[in-house]
Structure formats: C-alpha cells, structure tokens
Image (cartoon, grey):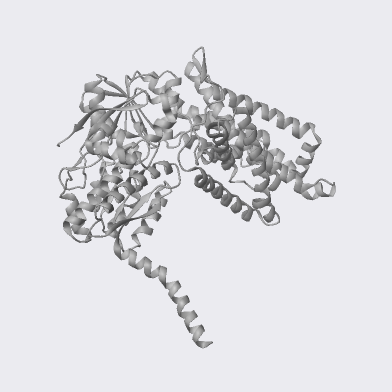
C-alpha cells in the first residue's frame, strides 16, 4: 500500500505537467485546427528565462516568474504573427511544418544564446519535501499539482463564465460564424497563442527544478503531452487534463509493476489502443457535436 | 576605357581568387583531423568539454612544431547526440579526402551506427565508447582511448565486493548499447566474485522520473548500487530521488557519476558516492598537467570527456611523426605499437584489438570534491 501511494503521488505529479502542456496543444488545435509542435519549446524557453532572471541576475523568485511569464506572452504573440498568421489561409500541413520549423528555431536560438550546459533552477520552496506517513511528498510535485488544479479551475471560469471565454469558444467552433457575429477572430486566435505560450511556460518553470533546464526538456514533456491529447480527445480541454494524468499514472505504475525499460511503451501502447478502439479519444462526442 | 576595364576585371578576379589561394595554401600547410561530437542534443554540454580537450592537445602539438612539419587542424561536425546525426556527421567528414584521421563519439551506440562507414573510409578512427564489442567486430580502424566496460564492470564489482564488503547488488543501467552492455558485464563480474544481483533495473534514456526504480531497489534488500547511466541529467534525477526516498546504501557508479555535468546538476545528492573514472586529476603527473591546461580554458572541472580527445591527438601526432607519412595503414600500425604512452587518462599500451587502456581509477565524491582512491590495472 505504501508503494502504491508513493507511486500514485508521483504519477499524478508528473501527469499534471503533461496535462498543462497538453492543454496548450488543445487550445491551439481548437482555435486553428493545427498541432503546434513548438508547444514543448515554450516550456523550455520559459525555464531558461527563469534561469536568467532568478539565478544569473539573482532577482526574487516571484519577480523572475512574473517577468518570465510576461516574456512568454510576448513570445506567444510573436509566434502567432510569424508562424501561424501568414499561413492562416493555407491547409493545415504548411502551418504544421511551420510550427516544426519554429520548434527547431527556438531550440537552436536558446542553444546559441545560452550554451549547451544544462542548468539548475532551485525549487519554489526551501524544503525539498515532506514525509507524510509512508509517503514522501516532493514539494515541487505538490506545487505542480496545486497550480495545475488552479489553472484548470481558472480555465473553466474563463471559458464558461466570461464573455471573452465565450468568444474564444465561438472562434474555435466556427470562425466564419464568429466573424458574422462581430467577434474579432484574429484577436481571439492571438489571445489563444498568448495563453498557450503562458501555459507551456508555467509547465516548464514548474518542472524545471525536477528535470533540470536543458534544450531537450521541452521535447521530453511534449511527446507525452501529445499522447495525452490523443487519449483525451484532440480538441477537448477536459480530455487533455484527464489524458495527462492518465499518462503520468500509467507510465509510473507500468514501470513499477511490469517493466521499467518499457515505461515509455506503456503510455504509447495505450495511445495505440485508443487510436484503434476510440480514435476520437475519451471525450470524442463533443468533437462530433461540434462538427 | 578598355584598358581600365581589363585592369578592373583582373583586379576583381585576383581579389576573388585570393581567399581561395590562401585557403589552398593553408590547407597544404596543415594536416586535418575530423572530429564527430555533439554540439546539439542532450549531450551538447559534454561535446563542449571534448572540443576543449582536443583543442588543448592541438595547441600543444602545434606549438611544439606540429606533425611532419605541419600544423594540425581540427574539422568538426555535430552528431546531434543521435545515431542518424552521427552517421551524417561522419559522412560529411569522410567526404573530405584531406582528413587523415578521425575522433569519434564518446557514446557506444553512435560508434556502432557509424562502424560500417568507418570501415569503408579506412582511416584511423579514435573513439571513446566503452562497449567492449566495438573493438572486437573486425574493424581494424577502431582505436579506443578509454578503458572498455569489461574493465569498468570488474573494477566496480571488485571495489564493491572486496573493498566495501557488499554482497547484494542493485543494478541500474540505461537500455542503450552502453548501459545494456555495462549492466550485463557488471552482473557477470559480481557473480564471478561470489556476490549476487538482488535486482537489475534497466531504464530508457531521458526519463523524467525514477521513483519506480528507486523504490524497487529499496525493497529488494540490495546493500550496494552499481550503475551505468548514459546521460548526466538522468543520473542526477535518480540521485536526488534516491536521497529523497531514503535509498542511502553505498553506490559505485560508472564514470558518469563523477562527470562535470553530473556534479553540477546533482550537487549534494551524489556526495559520498564512489565511481570509476578513467580520468582523475590526482592519479598521475600527466593528469595534473592536463588539469592545469584545462583550467586555463574552462571553468568546468576536467573529466573523461575532455581527457580522452586530448590523449587521442597526442597519440595520433606521435604515430604520424613516427611513420613519417599520412598513410592510414602505417599510422594505425604505429598507434597500435605504442607502449607506455603516459596520457591524462592513464598509460596507453595498445593491444591487437585497438584498446589502449586496461584499468580504471576509483574515486570518491567527498562533499563535492573528487578524491582519487586507487588505480586498478588488469593484465589479462
């Protein structure tokens, strides 16, 4: 039972990170019908910004965090204007390739500016963790879980309880109809990119004290987050969150009870099963309704 | 007007041709060595260390008159820390006929990937991968500048069983060529010494979490950890989680345990660990001299990543000067005939397979300082 609880905590913690990045995937997919392959790089860029502000410049952690997130908002806007907007009337393939190109550009830009050495970003709390009975609760995982739940609640409020959220939903469901209703579609898509970059950035900053800050950290997370979106149903917010937690828990328990070398395979085995049995994902009905 | 145009054209042609003529002249004055190293990807940091080590050696050789009266020149290509990247990088270098020898990757899996191309190129290929099979595949051009894993496994097992008195091992290793081979050899060496493997945990590279591995070792009853980690960040994550989850048994690891990047990332989580190290600053006067040279160009501590390319260029230059030509076969034969070359990593005496080093240093991490314990050399 002790082992089970420890694994559950770890699985939920790592799953929360996947869920945050998956959320970014889904939001952009809903708004543009394109998978943004640079979503993981948003996490990497934000983590490096934190290293610059909090470690190199020695600024207070919260100040560094807020400035890094503001930087990610700007990056999201620039990303929209340079990677998506010029190709918005093309089919999905050129846009998709454009995001892959942007991913390579971001990774190599950070490499050229900061160098290849992995960096250490201290955790948010001085205490590394707490022993609660037989379970060790890593303080960073606790923060990740809390922030993810808070962002999920914020997202629910934003989309369901605010006018701007309704406009974002309308844009994602039918751009032409949204335009006819007077909704500034281009502005809503811009807002979506900004919000997705911020979400990816928060995920990167949260996970950096665990994974360390490296050029590859984005791709390590993004691959699993992508799998999470498939399980949850591409285009569904609740599905992305559920898929993220599912991937985290499946790979942790699979590694512990079946085989560590096949840890990554368990997550992708579930993805393959979903693609065969239920390609629309867990919450596929809503997508069907939307269509 | 015509005269002026003719002069103008001639001047233009001369100015365009000048850099080319200069390059040809410079190329004729230098001997080129190709180097495949990671500039991008997960191992980009260690690629920087390797390049620094190679450049120190190059500088040293060139300042002392060069090779065959010419300056050595390094031509590098990025392997992107991937097997396809390594193949592409080597093929770019192999296409340059004036390159006389190569420095290959430090990772065994990448050396396996380019082995066939090396065979076709038929020029000396110095490398750092430690999978024993690499020099036993019948490829005469593979010349190794690190002790292979038959030695590393025996030293880890010997130190854990005979010095620390531990009999019940928990093994952790990556599942790539380096880790799988190291884990297998370590299990065999432990068995040979009459100890047993309580648990053997392979893991995929770039794992974000090691909780299941740590908990499995903890519940296995193992009284010592033996490890072969490929990447420093994986080792650092494992070390930190082991400490958090109360896995405090002694740990004897592969050289990654004391790699500069691991020390930086893991910090106190790897204090108190033991490791085998092909490079240890206090192991010899040559190692100390290398540390001094390295500290002048890098803020990172010297480690195997920088030491083996330094030694490889030293051995190459001696071999080329000895044969007095750039004939690949003669250079190879001269390299394999070298006995007792004192390098930063140790004393090189090449066997017929191309293995130059036959033992390891044991070091321990005392509160972040790497302390040399002893050197174990094998004659069989």
Task: Quadrant for residue A53, please give it.
Answer: top right
Give the residue displayed 27% in from the left and 20% down from the top.
Answer: B166
Residue B150: x, y in percent? 24, 36
**Quarter containing the C terminus of chain A:** top right
Q: Residue furthest right?
A: A181
- Is A117 displayed left or right of B62 in the figure? right
Foreground: B26 or A5? B26
Residue A196: x, y in percent? 66, 40
Foreground: A245 or B296? B296
- Is A238 displayed left or right of B260 in the figure? right
Q: Is residue A140 above or below residue B286?
A: above
- Is A278 displayed left or right of B281 in the figure? right
Residue B188 seen in the figure = no
Residue B44 seen in the figure = yes
Q: Is residue B340 above or below residue B161?
A: below
Give the residue displayed 84% in from the left and 47% down from the top.
Answer: A182
Residue A116: x, y in percent? 46, 42
Foreground: B60 or B113? B60
- Is B275 displayed left or right of A5 in the figure? left
Q: Is residue B238 above or below residue A52?
A: above
């Amino acid at each position: 039972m002790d082992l089970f609880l420890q694994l559950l905590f770890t699985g939920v913690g790592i799953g929360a990170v996947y869920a945050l990045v998956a959320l970014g995937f889904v939001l952009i997919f809903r708004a543009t019908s394109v998978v943004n392959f640079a979503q993981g790089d948003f996490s990497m860029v934000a983590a490096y910004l934190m290293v610059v502000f909090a470690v190199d410049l020695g600024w207070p952690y919260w100040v560094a965090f807020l400035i890094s997130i503001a930087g990610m908002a700007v990056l999201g806007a620039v990303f929209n204007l340079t990677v998506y907007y010029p190709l918005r009337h093309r089919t999905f393939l050129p846009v998709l390739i454009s995001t892959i190109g942007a991913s390579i550009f971001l990774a190599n830009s950070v490499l050229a500016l900061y160098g290849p050495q992995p960096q250490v970003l201290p955790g948010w709390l001085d205490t590394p963790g707490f022993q609660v009975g037989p379970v060790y609760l890593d303080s960073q995982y606790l923060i990740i879980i809390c922030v993810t739940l808070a962002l999920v609640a914020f997202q629910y409020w934003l989309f369901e309880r605010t006018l701007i959220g309704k406009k974002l939903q309308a844009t994602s469901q039918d751009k032409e109809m949204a335009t006819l209703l007077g909704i500034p579609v281009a502005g809503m898509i811009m807002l979506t990119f900004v919000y997705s970059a911020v979400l990816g950035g928060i995920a990167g900053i949260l996970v950096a004290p665990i994974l360390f800050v490296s050029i590859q950290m984005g791709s390590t997370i993004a691959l699993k987050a992508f799998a999470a979106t498939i399980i949850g149903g591409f285009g569904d917010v609740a599905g992305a969150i559920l898929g993220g937690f599912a991937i985290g828990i499946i790979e942790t328990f699979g590694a512990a009870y079946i085989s560590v070398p096949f840890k990554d395979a368990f997550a992708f085995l579930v993805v393959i099963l979903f693609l065969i049995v239920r390609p629309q994902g867990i919450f596929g009905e809503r997508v069907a309704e939307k269509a | 007007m015509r005269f002026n145009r003719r002069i103008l054209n001639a001047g233009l042609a001369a100015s365009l041709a000048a850099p080319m003529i200069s390059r040809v002249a410079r190329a004729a004055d230098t001997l080129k060595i190709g180097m495949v190293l990671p500039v991008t990807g997960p191992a980009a940091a260690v690629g920087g260390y390797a390049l620094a080590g190679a450049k120190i050696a190059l500088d040293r050789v060139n300042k002392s008159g060069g090779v065959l009266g010419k300056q050595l020149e390094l031509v590098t290509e990025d392997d992107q820390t991937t097997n396809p990247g390594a193949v592409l990088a080597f093929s770019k270098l192999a296409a340059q006929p004036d390159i006389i020898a190569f420095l290959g990757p430090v990772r065994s899996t990448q050396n396996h990937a380019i082995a066939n191309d090396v065979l076709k190129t038929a020029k000396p290929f110095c490398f750092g991968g430690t999978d024993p099979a690499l020099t036993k595949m019948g490829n005469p051009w593979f010349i190794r500048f690190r002790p292979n894993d038959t030695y590393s496994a025996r030293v880890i097992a010997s130190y854990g069983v005979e010095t620390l008195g531990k009999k019940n091992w928990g093994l952790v290793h990556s599942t790539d060529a380096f880790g799988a081979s190291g884990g297998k050899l370590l299990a065999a060496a432990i068995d040979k010494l009459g100890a047993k493997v309580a648990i053997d945990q392979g893991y995929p590279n770039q794992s974000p979490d090691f909780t299941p591995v740590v908990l499995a070792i903890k519940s296995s009853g193992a009284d010592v950890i033996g490890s072969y980690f490929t990447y420093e960040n994986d080792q650092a994550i494992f070390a930190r989680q082991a400490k958090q989850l109360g896995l405090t048994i002694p740990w004897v690891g592969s050289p990654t345990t004391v790699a500069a990047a691991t020390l930086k990332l893991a910090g106190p989580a790897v204090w108190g660990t033991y490791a085998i190290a092909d490079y240890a600053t206090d192991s010899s006067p040559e190692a100390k001299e290398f540390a001094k040279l390295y500290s002048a160009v890098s803020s990172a501590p010297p480690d195997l990543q920088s030491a083996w390319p330094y030694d490889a260029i030293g051995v190459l230059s001696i071999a080329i000067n000895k044969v007095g030509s750039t004939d690949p076969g003669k250079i190879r034969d001269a390299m394999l005939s070298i006995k007792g070359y004192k390098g930063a990593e140790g004393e090189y005496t090449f066997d017929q397979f191309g293995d130059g080093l036959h033992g390891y240093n044991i070091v321990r991490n005392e509160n972040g300082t790497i302390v040399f314990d002893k050197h174990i050399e094998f004659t069989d």
